[in-house]
Amino acid sequence: MNINFNTGKKVDRIEEEDIIEDDDDDEQEVRRKQQKKQNAELKKQLIKFMGIIAVLLVLFFLIMLVLSLTTKRSRSFSDVEKIMKEAGEKYMEDHSEYLPEEGDIIDIPASNLINEEYMKDFSVLIPDENVTCNSGTSYVTVENSAGKYVYSPYLDCGDSYVTTELYKVVANDDNIVTSGYGLYAINGAYVFKGDNVNNYVQLGDYLWQIVRINNDNTITLVFAEGIRDLQSSWDDRFNTDKGYEIGINSYQNSRVREKLETIFKGKYQRERDSREITVMSAANKAKLAPFDMCVGKRSHEDTSKNNETECIEKIQNQYVGLLTVSEYMNASLDVNCTNTLSESCQNYNYLKSGINGTDKYKFCLATGDSTNTYDVYGVTEDGNIEVKHAINSCYIRPVVHLKENVYFKSGKGTYEKPYKIK
């Protein structure tokens, strides 16, 4: 009988390898079970930890809620003014018989609003023992401006805070100068003179500049930016003196006045890209006061700077206009700016160029030449007052008057931080 030893040995090795593989499988199974057990334990710990966090968050929010309900919250003065305005609007909804007629103004005392529960007492709104607001001297003004009711709160909290009109902030004693650039007191009015004066006002989306504070505390503003978007011929009508279309230098019937009124009424279509822009929103129009625009003509040699010549002829109750020659001359600090066409009038004059003194453009003035019927005055790109035919085109710088009761919100009058109004 023959025995195959090789075969027998091979069989023995296979069996031995099978045993080793079985041992490995057992060890892997044990490790898997241990890992599974560890994962389960970690999951339990994580769930427990998350539960603790959730409980802590709930406790935190409950504590904050209790604090918010038990702690008296002091509002800012601006917030209180907003509450007063809203209370005044609700009051008038229920007392429409008190609404003012067009052009009239009435005051609603804060005491009425508090007593009739349209708002809470000032001591509740501002629970600060160091602040006392007077409900007898605080009020909400209601004005009927061309059929639109404008509500303006006035808050009197003594030394802590008082709602302040813009003209009072601008004409503060600290801002008045007697030399150099700045605001000058002249015959009961206040006039800005020189370069780099802090007279910027944010009105809607655009910057304007204060020309002067008038004797009635209204504020004359001139458009400071976007000037290249507003352009027009001063006038292009047929002139009988010349026998052709050269224009007539009467502002009252001019094309430039028509263009101004179109701009003021609504949207203006820019010529360069046909995009419509709104120079003055309805809300801001309600802050404007009507004024008598001086449109008298003057000669080249006229030396007046106080609108004496221009105001010989006026258009009453205007809401938008242009600068006069006098107003441009009066903004210069140069002593050599002595008559209408003095080149020195461009010196030390913030009106010479556009926003922040960086832009150069020629723009229209409202004044015509008294020596003929077809020439008008304007300002060149270099800032000189020039005389030219009315048919020539020029850029438009609208002029408006802010009402006396327009209230200051913030700002310093600089280009970076212009005055803002409420």
Image (spheres, rainbow, N blue to C red):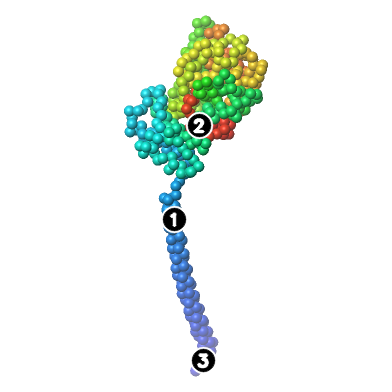
**Would you name the residue on which mark 1 appears?**
63
Q: Could you tell me residue 287's position as x and y percent?
A: 46, 27
Q: Nearer the viewer, mark 2 or mark 3?
A: 2
Q: Nearer the viewer, residue 305 or 129?
A: 129
| Mark 1 neighbour density, 10 Å: few (under 14) some (14–19) many (20 or more) | few
Q: Earlier in the sequence, mark 2 or mark 3?
A: 3
Q: Earlier in the sequence, mark 1 or mark 3?
A: 3
Q: Position of residue 266 (x, y in %)?
A: 44, 25
Amino acid type for the residue under numbered disc 3: Ile
Q: Judging from the image, what secondary structure is the residue with disc 3 in?
A: loop
Residue pointed to by mark 3: 3
Residue indicated by mark 2: 164
How far, Cα to Cα, is label 2 from label 3?
A: 122 Å
Q: Position of residue 215 (x, y in %)?
A: 52, 20
Residue 164 in view: yes
Q: Secondary structure at mark 1?
A: helix
Left or right relative to 196: residue 163: left
| Residue 344: x %, y % from top left | 65, 18
Could you say whether the residue bearing mark 2 is in a helix, strand or loop?
loop
